Amino acid sequence: MVDVYQESVNPNVVVKVDALNSGYGASHVLFGVDFEANEKEITVVVGPNGSGKSTLLKSIFGMCAIYSGEITFQHDTITGMMPHKVARGGIAYLPQVNNVFANLTIKENLSMASYTLDSKTMSSRIQEVLETFPILAKYKNGKAETLSGGERQMLAMAMALIRRPKVMLFDEPTANLSPKLAGEVLSKVDHMRKEFGITIILVEQNVKRALKMADVVYLLANGKLVFKGKPDELLKHPELSKLYLGIS
């Protein structure tokens, strides 16, 4: 295995993971992983299936067992914090599935997501996200279960955006989507970074698309960090790209 990970110091770190060992009960998944995401950047995490990408996101969001290591958010320790407290602090997590209320209308989903806001702010935020996601405005009175996979992803993104998180964790948002819809979803992810200044941490199997929008990329393999750097630097290491990502 080629280890091209290089230590660097970034002054604008929002989320930082130090020497993380985590998993699920007795199932140890991540081994000594270091990770950081900078403010208003898109940090992409790639790697083969089972490499620990989703576990990294879930560890940050308080959904995994932390055996050792530290996780900080805006320099405050959140290691092992319950998910609802992590969310309240300003981190949103969007899983692949079960990320909307299928039996509710789009407008009701958005109202549910903004229940902690006062009525005036709720109204303005809902209007804003409907302008950001015009397809949702078109079907706002229809039930979420009638939406396509890509439209559901956009609804989940809109629900998270209403709460104005500082960081959004995306777990393979384009899984099982057509290339066209996948492109639209990733375009909206990039838009939320640019328009709203949200720090994005993106786990994505669509490696080539993800690398095009990434500021920094991490490569995980077998629960360990193999590479950290710029996307073009990863592509300059054909042995890594071919071995772990299938890019030749």
Image (cartoon, helix red, strand yellow):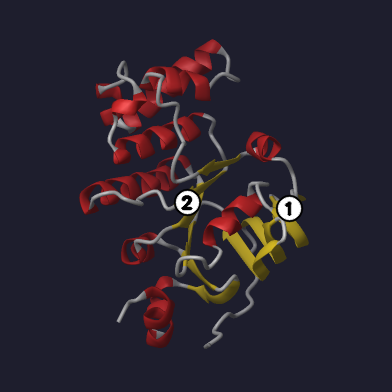
Residue position for label 1: 75
Residue shown at the point (51%, 20%) measured from the top left: 112
In front of the other: 103 or 81:
103
Residue shown at the point (47%, 34%) measured from the top left: 161
Question: Badge 2: few (under 14), some or many (20 or more) residues near its Cα, within 10 Å?
Answer: many
Give residue 57's position: percent from left, percent from top.
58, 53
Taking the image as shown, residue 108 lies to the left or right of residue 78, namely left
Please give the label number shown on residue 171. Answer: 2
Give residue 45's position: percent from left, percent from top.
49, 63
Give residue 242's position: percent from left, percent from top.
37, 82
Asked if residue 186 is positioned above or below residue 11 in the image, the reply reads above
Determine the secondary structure under disc 1: loop
The quarter of the rendered structure image containing the C terminus is bottom left
Q: Nearer the viewer, mark 2 or mark 1?
A: 2
Determine the secondary structure under disc 2: strand
Q: CA distance from mark 2 to mark 1?
A: 24 Å
Q: Amino acid at mark 2?
A: Asp
Residue shown at the point (34%, 61%) measured from the top left: 206
Give residue 174's position: percent from left, percent from top.
35, 50
